[in-house]
Image (cartoon, rainbow, N blue to C red):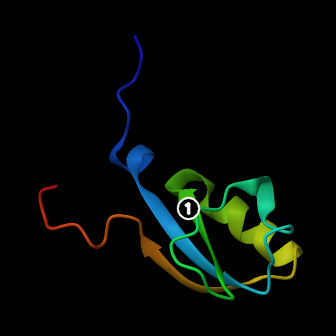
Amino acid sequence: MIPSPSPSDSRFFVYEVAGLNRYQQPDNSNYAIRPSDNVFIQVPYDRMNKKMRSITRLGGTIVSIRPLNEHLPKGE
């Protein structure tokens, strides 16, 4: 029997990171939201700690973390 996915499996967060350029982004898994000196990286809930360590090792600074769907109305 396959376990049903937990609610945290579908949650994603967006890290706003300063100090990385597009050639230094970890795993090339960035998702730019708007052009700026900062980069935006979409991270699944279960990989948040690993991604934080990776960003720090590359010399980046996490400026903010927010849920990917924070702009959606409740119930969507």
Residue 22 pos. (x, y %) = 79, 70
Q: Is residue 68 above or below residue 3?
A: below
Counting from the top left corner in percent of width and height, residue 33 is at 51, 72
Q: Residue at x 46, y 58 (%)?
A: 12
Quadrant of residue 9 in the image? Answer: top left
Three-letter amino acid code of the residue under disc 1: Gln
Residue 63, x across and y down, in percent: 61, 89
| 11 or 49: nearer the viewer | 11
From the viewer's perspective, tell me whether residue 34 is left or right of residue 11.
Answer: right
Residue furthest front in the image: 35
Q: At 71% across and 60% down in the image, what residue appears?
A: 50
Q: What residue is disc 1 on?
A: 42
Q: Quadrant of residue 67?
A: bottom left
Please tell me whether residue 9 is drawn above or below residue 15 in the rendered image: above
Front residue of this view, candidates 64 and 32:
32
SS class, disc 1: strand
Residue that lies at the very extreme toward the left in this rendered image:
75
Who is closer to the viewer here, 68 or 45? 68
Q: Residue extending furthest top?
A: 1
Q: Quadrant of the N terminus?
A: top left
* Number of residue marks: 1
Tell me the quarter of the image containing the C terminus. Answer: bottom left
Q: Can you give x and y, in whole percent of width and height, for residue 75 in the image?
A: 12, 57
The residue positioned 27% from the left and 73% from the top of the image is 71
Residue drawn at point x = 86 percent, y = 67 percent: 23
- On the picture, is 3 further left or further right than 21? left
